[in-house]
Amino acid sequence: MLTIVFQGIESQNHRATLESVMELFDTPPRIAVSISHKSLKSRRLGPSYVRTTVDRFPVVMEAGVSQTSMTSSEAQKASEEYYEFLSEVPQIAAAVEFHHPALPDHTAPADLSPTIIPVWDGKDLKALEGILTATSSVAMTYDGDKRVPALLRRNGHTADLTGGTMLAIGLPDLKEAKQAGFNAVMLSSWVHPGKFGEVSLWDGSKFHRVSSALKQALIEDNSDVIQRAGLDMALLRANDSREFIRLAAYSFISWAQSLDLSSDKSGGATVTELSIVSTPSDRTVGKGVKNVRRTVALPIFERHEVESLESDESGEVSLKKRSHLRPASETVRSCDSCFLSSTCPAYEAASSCAFNFPVEVRTDSQMKALLSSIMELQATRVAFARFAEEVNGGYPDEVVGKEMDRLFRMAERMKKVDEKRERLTVSVESESSGGGTGVLSRIFGEKAQVEPPPAIEADVVVAEIIED
């Protein structure tokens, strides 16, 4: 069973919104909520707020400082405050271990009553094996490493948050999480409609995630599904952000339920388990190839047929076809694996990239146009960096200076490309030189060899007087 852990519940508005979504289901869905200790402090809320939330949902606490810049002493202090807070709320279901790069070897106190879920940093697979062996629980940001699912499923896990929790942090693709062996997913993307305007919708067979520019068309195409769920189409048409957040929460829950149902029918996970998981220290290279497949051209290039007149050895001219390589017009990028998936305005699950990059550099004018475009892009970067420098108080930023220098170097190179220099090189070699220095080189070169004129012999008559 897959449990969704909704983040952002330190906001009372988000908590109330999620409570209203629960009323849309005939039977209470399997969910939990996450509360950030850092955000709780910034809102000046204490343990009483967490206890109130526990009465409504299972609560998973998190420190919320993994992306915060801290020194080791600041991180140590934040860690102590976090665990002290956890000791005051033993009613919570679990808590994610305090994790920050400034404290790489930090461990949680052993006497805490909440279940502490240790965090794996995603680097050492042997460390992951050690965590699973010791606690049978782990929290991580999953990057698609194919060896991780086998470790998770080989360890085995239960379906609750009190033991054997395999928690994926920030993985919006629930299908991928289910196949990888996670039984809980911590999500913040359900509140993105209020922040970025995007829309998440489960239509009963497919999960849609589109930008704000496409959301009205999406809800109109799925108006029947939305109305059957009990959501308000009038508010969605009026671009009500709270109703779009409700739609996202309802869609994620429905998607998780569908995945659980399909998993029950198929008798387990759909991904073939690996019998042996290789770690970097004991990895072996296979010596044999079992399946020799037909090779195809790399998808980054495509062939373009060009006809031209060519002459053969006999001098006969004929029309022949030749294949030229060009950048492929189609792309193999997909939204699910793209590193921009969380911020791209055209994101759509299980879809190919909506953008292409048509570039053709065949002539001198095209080359100059491309270089000019790159210079313009660099100029905008310099301008924006300078603006950021001014906004931050005007103190000289080293990065701005480097970007300016880069722009100047680009301008100099562009100037050299524009300059057309013609150069003529002539080499003349005399047979008598024996393959040595050429005639012109002897005359005009740095080591010009000037032969002295022949001497006048004494018996040669130079002039004769003739008398009349």
Image: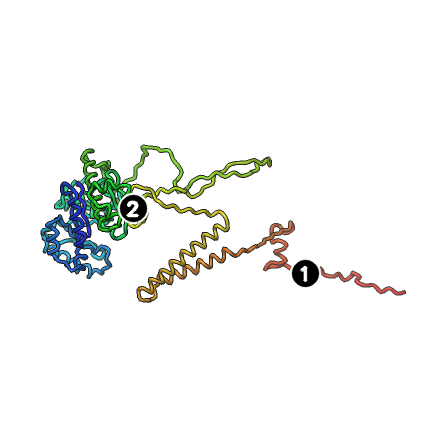
Q: Position of residue 421 (x, y in %)?
A: 55, 56
Say which mark, if any, is on residue 202: none
Residue denoted by label 1: 452
Q: Position of residue 439 (x, y in %)?
A: 63, 54
Helix, strand or loop under label 2: helix
* Between discs 2 and 1, the one toward the N terminus: 2
- Circle 2 residues within 10 Å: few <14, some 14–19, many ≥20: some
Q: Nearer the viewer, mark 2 or mark 1?
A: 2
Residue at 80 percent across and 61 percent down: it is 461
| Nearer to us in this view, 109 or 339 | 339
Marks 2 and 1 sit apart, C-alpha to C-alpha, by 96 Å
| Nearer to us in this view, 461 or 245 | 245
Residue 425's place in the image compared with 226, above or below, is below
In-image side of 454 versus 257 (left or right): right
Please name the amino acid that badge 2 sits on.
Answer: Gln
Q: Quadrant of the N terminus?
A: top left
- Circle 1 residues within 10 Å: few <14, some 14–19, many ≥20: few
Residue 326's place in the image compared with 425, above or below, is above
